[in-house]
């Protein structure tokens, strides 16, 4: 082999053999002996800098966030802040000025609150909401709703074009959701692979097992309350000013802890380390505007 | 100035065969079309194969049935109208000036089209091809005036082009009856031995005028191909209609899908001919109501059961022209709301709309393809259907006006009623709008927190038993649990009411409570309905 300058380029014998083998097998197995580089996984931010940094730190990725083309799980009990995290994700995907994408929420128990979502920054015009069931608590109804939610998810993933498909199984009892066969999760994982879509499951405990690329465990650590009259802040269960009437109290927000419970694939592997602590604020409009709480008034959907 | 004439021979037969040919292959068989009310039912048209088999116009049905190989069909005026509209569309594909001369004949002004479509020979071939694409076998003729073109199309099969100045020579061999003369004049000419146009053209004008008057001169001018007239342009239709009457009523969706497929194919071909699409597809099914069954059902249920037609409208977010997508949408719609009786006649109407022009950008994020999304949404609706009904209490409580709609984009309603929203049809082609929260953030970034606490709703709101202490909730008995849960923190009450002026007045007292359940603390929004005094769990903070 001769270079442009005319000098011979030394090639090892192994290289020549490799090239010969590859050319002979090219019809059956293209690039048989070439190691394929995995494409860089694209992620989108959760909208919470602490969580993004935590994920990046735990998984060893360059930038933190939820991976596209993969199945991720957000697990947590009720009032843990998991829905707030999901709304923040939706807001990032639909409302991000550089990439305004379409999202779908498959709502197994009809729990989605549009006003709350819009208040979080979600562009509702770019959101497809599929209400699969009701929050009746009936076991049979829960099975039906779950079955419908899985079917709808399948259809949406096949259709394509969404930036994020969020499946809300948050109010489905674990004993019901655990019955989803692993093959369904495998199918979902295969359906989103090599697509720009991220599939996020919101649930009480992880169900997708090895099919999930990232599992975030969300837990509420404290709730912040305040009293308007005494101008004091306190957490749930602690002592408040007994003389102050209850209508002067206000639930200010939840303290949320996010933990990377599991990650795989391009994220490397990490497990069970506490990573983030973030706070959310209660969207409430029922208090009259005052000097202390003027900030809250502005975030109401119907204010201004 | 050249004109083209498209003439469809045996028009009633071709109109009927046009839509069912793909299903039954009738075009290859001898077919005759009957009209009239029994017992006087006669043959009004027959195709060439039927004529060869001995069928002639005017035969009674009994006589026609003597030829067992001939298929006898009823005349369908609706299908003839559709076929005529298709002919007009075919002409309007090439020129805006198209005359609807007769149901089976249209004349197209070809002036100035040579630069667009090439020489008139190729235009004539293209017209013939387009007409065949509409399911009609037509004769196409081009001549320097409309009448000469029409007579050539009536007389010569296939495609004919008559150069200017050669009209008399080319039309000369045609029989006199192509001119559409009255019986009396035809008889007179026959007595004279004038049986073709050449003989008529050769008659002395003065003598012809003395014997037949001005009509004679007009006929001679037509025979010479030297008439001149202005064509009357037909109005371009804004909607497209295709219909089909069935010999036997269809009561299964599968055979109905075959017919719909054929009609949609025709509809899409016509839309394509005019470079249009549709954003509203209307399906009207005429049903064959069984009077006896109807009477029995009415007497048992004591209510009027159904009408004799079934109409469905499919509104599309973007104009489309894909027959397969339309078929799937109609199939899914029929599956979810099937007609109550067998179908006797199918009509499909498409409202015309400008075709969508969209160009994707390299750096624009992918969005759902509108055509594909419509199908997906229809499938999803089929999956989640049956959950649209709500109790009257819930209807009163939530202002989810479109309760049946469980798939779409939520739109907040300008009201104080809690959890009020509407469902809008989801479409991937929305105008870029900045969400309210972002607008607020851009203006007042410091006052808005990074993450807002989300609310998860219970729909319908769950009834809950509440123990009060000093007028405030102290313990809750949640639905499904046996023990009371202790309230560890609370805020409230806040009173809220509205619509007191109407039937759906609401008034409530809301509390935010923190409840200890096992090891966790749950944050709920509970409220007391001040009209009924009952307590409900509306949602949780999550």
Image: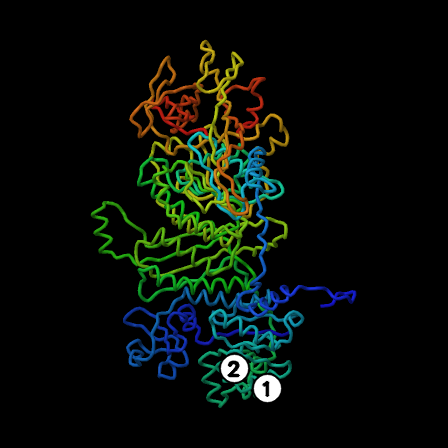
Q: Quadrant of residue B472?
A: top left
Q: Badge 1, how many Cα within 10 Å: few under 14, some, many 20+?
A: some
Which chain is mark 1 on?
A: B
Q: Residue at image x 57%, y 55%?
A: B356
Q: Could you say which disc has been placed on residue A140 in the image?
A: none
Q: Residue B189's spot in the image, x, y percent?
A: 49, 86
> Which image quarter: residue A35?
bottom right
Percent position of residue B284, x then y:
39, 56
Residue B533 versus residue A291: which sits nearer the camera? A291
Apparent side of residue B145 relative to residue B38 in the rendered image (left or right): right
For disc 2, the chain is B
Q: Is residue B38 left or right of residue B449?
A: left
Q: Earlier in the sequence, mark 1 or mark 2?
A: 2
Could you tell me residue B216's position as x and y percent? 54, 81
Which of labels 1 and 2 is toward the front? 2
Percent coordinates x, y for residue B468 in the rendering: 35, 16
Instruction: Classify the position of the N terminus of chain B by image quarter.
Output: bottom right
**Mark 2 secondary-structure assignment:** loop
- Disc 1 designates what residue? B169
Distance between the Cα atoms at labels 1 and 2? 14 Å
Q: A96 or B322: nearer the eye?
A: A96
Identify residue for label 2: B156
* Rendering colour mode: rainbow
> Horizontal placement of B467 versus B229: left or right?
left
* The one of B24 and A192 positioned closer to us in this rendering: A192
């Amino acid at each position: 082999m001769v270079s442009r300058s005319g000098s011979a380029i030394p090639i090892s014998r192994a290289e020549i053999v490799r090239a010969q083998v590859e050319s002979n097998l090219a019809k059956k197995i293209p690039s048989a002996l070439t190691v394929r580089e995995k494409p860089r996984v694209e992620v989108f931010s959760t909208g919470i800098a602490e969580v993004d940094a935590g994920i990046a730190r735990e998984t060893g990725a360059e930038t933190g966030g939820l991976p596209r083309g993969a199945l991720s799980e957000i697990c947590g009990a009720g009032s843990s802040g998991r829905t707030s995290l999901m709304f923040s994700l939706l807001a990032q995907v639909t409302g991000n000025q550089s990439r305004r994408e379409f999202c779908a929420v498959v709502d197994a128990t009809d729990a989605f609150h549009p006003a709350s979502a819009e208040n979080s920054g979600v562009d509702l015009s770019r959101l497809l909401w599929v209400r699969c069931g009701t929050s009746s608590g009936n076991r049979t109804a829960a099975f039906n709703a779950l079955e419908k939610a899985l079917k709808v998810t399948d259809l949406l993933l096949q259709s394509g074009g969404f930036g994020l498909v969020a499946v809300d199984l948050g109010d489905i009892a674990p004993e019901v959701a655990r019955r989803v066969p692993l093959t369904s999760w495998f199918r979902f994982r295969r359906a989103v692979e090599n697509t720009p879509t991220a599939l996020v499951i919101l649930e009480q405990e992880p169900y997708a097992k090895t099919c999930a690329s990232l599992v975030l465990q969300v837990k509420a650590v404290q709730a912040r309350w305040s009293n308007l009259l005494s101008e004091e802040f306190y957490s749930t269960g602690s002592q408040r000013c007994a003389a102050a009437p209850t209508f002067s109290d206000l639930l200010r927000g939840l303290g949320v802890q996010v933990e990377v419970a599991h990650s795989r694939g391009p994220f490397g592997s990490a497990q069970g380390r506490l990573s983030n602590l973030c706070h959310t604020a209660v969207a409430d409009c029922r208090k009259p505007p005052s000097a202390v709480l003027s900030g809250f008034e502005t975030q109401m959907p119907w204010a201004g | 100035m050249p004109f083209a004439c498209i003439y469809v021979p045996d028009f009633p037969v071709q109109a009927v065969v046009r839509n069912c040919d793909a299903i039954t292959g009738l075009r290859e068989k001898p077919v005759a079309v009957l009209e009239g009310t029994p017992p006087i039912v006669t043959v009004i048209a027959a195709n060439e194969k039927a004529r060869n088999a001995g069928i002639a116009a005017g035969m009674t049905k009994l006589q026609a049935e003597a030829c067992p190989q001939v298929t006898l069909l009823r005349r369908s005026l609706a299908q003839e109208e559709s076929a005529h509209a298709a002919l007009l569309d075919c002409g309007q594909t090439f020129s805006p000036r198209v005359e609807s001369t007769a149901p089976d004949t249209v004349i197209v002004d070809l002036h100035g089209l040579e630069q667009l479509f090439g020489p008139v020979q190729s235009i004539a071939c293209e017209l013939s091809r387009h007409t065949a694409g509409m399911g009609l076998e037509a004769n196409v003729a081009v001549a320097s005036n409309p009448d000469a073109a029409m007579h050539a199309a009536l007389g010569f099969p296939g495609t004919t082009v008559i150069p200017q100045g050669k009209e008399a020579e080319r039309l000369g061999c045609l029989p006199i009856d192509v001119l559409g003369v009255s019986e009396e004049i035809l008889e007179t000419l026959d007595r004279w031995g004038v049986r073709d146009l050449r003989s008529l053209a050769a008659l002395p004008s003065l003598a012809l005028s003395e014997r037949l008057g001005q009509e004679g001169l007009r006929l001679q001018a037509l025979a010479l191909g030297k008439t001149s007239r202005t064509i009357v342009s037909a109005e371009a239709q804004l909607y497209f209609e295709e219909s089909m009457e069935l010999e036997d009523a269809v009561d299964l969706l599968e055979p109905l899908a075959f017919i719909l497929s054929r009609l949609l194919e025709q509809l899409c071909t016509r839309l394509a001919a005019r470079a249009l699409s549709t954003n509203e597809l209307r399906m009207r099914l005429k049903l064959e109501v069984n009077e006896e069954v109807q009477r029995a059902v009415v007497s048992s249920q004591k209510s009027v059961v159904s009408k004799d037609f079934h109409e469905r409208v499919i509104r599309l977010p973007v104009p489309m022209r894909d027959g397969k997508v339309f078929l799937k949408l109609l199939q899914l719609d029929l599956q979810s709301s099937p007609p109550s009786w067998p179908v006797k006649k199918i009509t499909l109407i498409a409202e015309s709309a400008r075709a969508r022009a969209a160009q994707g950008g390299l750096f624009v994020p992918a969005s759902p393809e509108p055509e594909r999304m419509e199908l997906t949404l229809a499938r999803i609706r089929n999956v989640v259907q049956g959950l649209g009904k709500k109790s009257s209490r819930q209807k009163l409580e939530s202002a989810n006006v479109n309760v049946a709609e469980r798939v779409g984009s939520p739109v907040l309603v300008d009201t104080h009623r809690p959890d009020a929203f509407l469902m809008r049809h989801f479409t991937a082609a929305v105008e870029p709008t900045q969400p309210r929260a972002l607008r607020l953030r851009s203006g007042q970034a410091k006052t808005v927190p990074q993450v807002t606490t989300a609310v998860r709703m219970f729909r319908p709101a769950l009834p809950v038993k509440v123990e009060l202490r000093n007028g405030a909730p102290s313990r809750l008995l949640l639905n499904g649990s046996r023990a009371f849960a202790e309230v560890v923190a609370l805020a409230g009450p806040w009173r809220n009411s509205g619509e007191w002026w109407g039937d759906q007045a609401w008034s409530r007292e809301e509390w935010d409570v923190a409840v200890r359940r096992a090891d966790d603390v749950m944050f709920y929004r509970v409220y007391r309905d001040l009209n009924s005094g009952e307590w409900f769990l509306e949602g949780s903070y999550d």
